[in-house]
Image: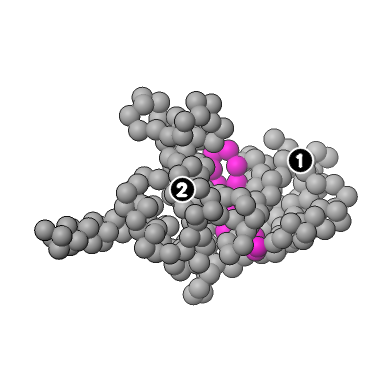
Amino acid sequence: MREILGRRRKFSLRRGARSPLLRAALTCATEWQWPVLPGVGLAPGSGRPRECGCPQPDCAVPGGHPFDPVLLAATTDPRMVRWWWTNRPTAPVLLATGGRGPCAVSLPAVAGMRALGAIERSGVRLGPVIATPTRWAILVAPYSLEELGDLLYRQDWVPSSLRFHGEGGYLVLPPSQIGAGGVRWERAPLRRGGRPWLPEVATVVDALVEASSSAPDGGSRLAY
């Protein structure tokens, strides 16, 4: 009987590989070596599709945050990744930023759309960009808190709408669904084997500040 159950479980894991979320998680974990874990997801059968699956009735980021397992459980182990998404096939894919994974700079969605065009017209090369209905995140090479502090200290001014996702942070990866809506690649990861290319955080921040301060009307491209 145990052998039959074992064969059935193995078959279910193979079937789970057809899931877009599992495929995305496995690509990040095994091909790119980015540590991932499942997000809490949205509450099933509640009649409120945007309600978070966590116990907090007023959750600020419905569906798109760690709960169980906690963020420290993020891994690149394909066996763990398969187990997680076989048991929770609709769970959002979360990237643990910093350390072995990329970091990111994010800004409000409208500002992100404007700034991205301005940055690319200036000739600055960007890496992957994640878009949600509320915020866009530009992935960058891992940086330390000290490096970020030195970078910000050198700036005369930094838009208050910018957020920095480093060690101990996380991002929701495509093709996840969260309370705000779908998560997608605005700029898909480009690679020639191995990990996707990532720019340095200083390059991105300098370009964002320049794009913001050069708005034609004298305002800021990065304002809400």
SS of the residue under disc 2: loop
In this rendering, position of residue 224 left or right of residue 63? right
Name the residue furthest left.
Answer: 1
* Percent x, y of residue 173: 50, 51
Find the distance from the CA under tag 1 to the CA under tag 2.
32 Å
Horizontal side of residue 111 vs 218, given as left or right:
left
User: Magenta stretch containing residue 137, yes or no?
Assistant: yes
Say which amino acid is labelled 1: Ser
Q: Quadrant of residue 46?
A: top left
Residue 29 covered by magenta stretch: no
Residue linked to disc 1: 160
Q: Residue at x 35, y 58 (%)?
A: 82
Point 51% across, 60% down: residue? 35
Q: Name the quarter where the N terminus is drawn.
A: bottom left
Q: Quadrant of the C terminus?
A: top right
Residue name at image x 39 percent, y 33 percent: 43
Q: Position of residue 149 (x, y in %)?
A: 80, 55
Q: Which of 44/27 is in front?
A: 44
Q: Is residue 158 above or below residue 33?
A: above
Query: Can the viewer see residue 121 in this picture?
Result: no
CB atoms at circles 1 and 2 under 8 Å apart?
Answer: no
Q: Which mark is residue 69?
A: 2
Secondary element at tag 1: loop
Measured from the top left, where is residue 185 in percent x and y?
51, 53
For the residue marked with disc 2, what is the amino acid?
Pro
Q: Nearer the viewer, residue 58 or 224?
A: 58
Q: Residue shown at 31%/59% (left/top)?
A: 17
- Magenta segment range? 128-142
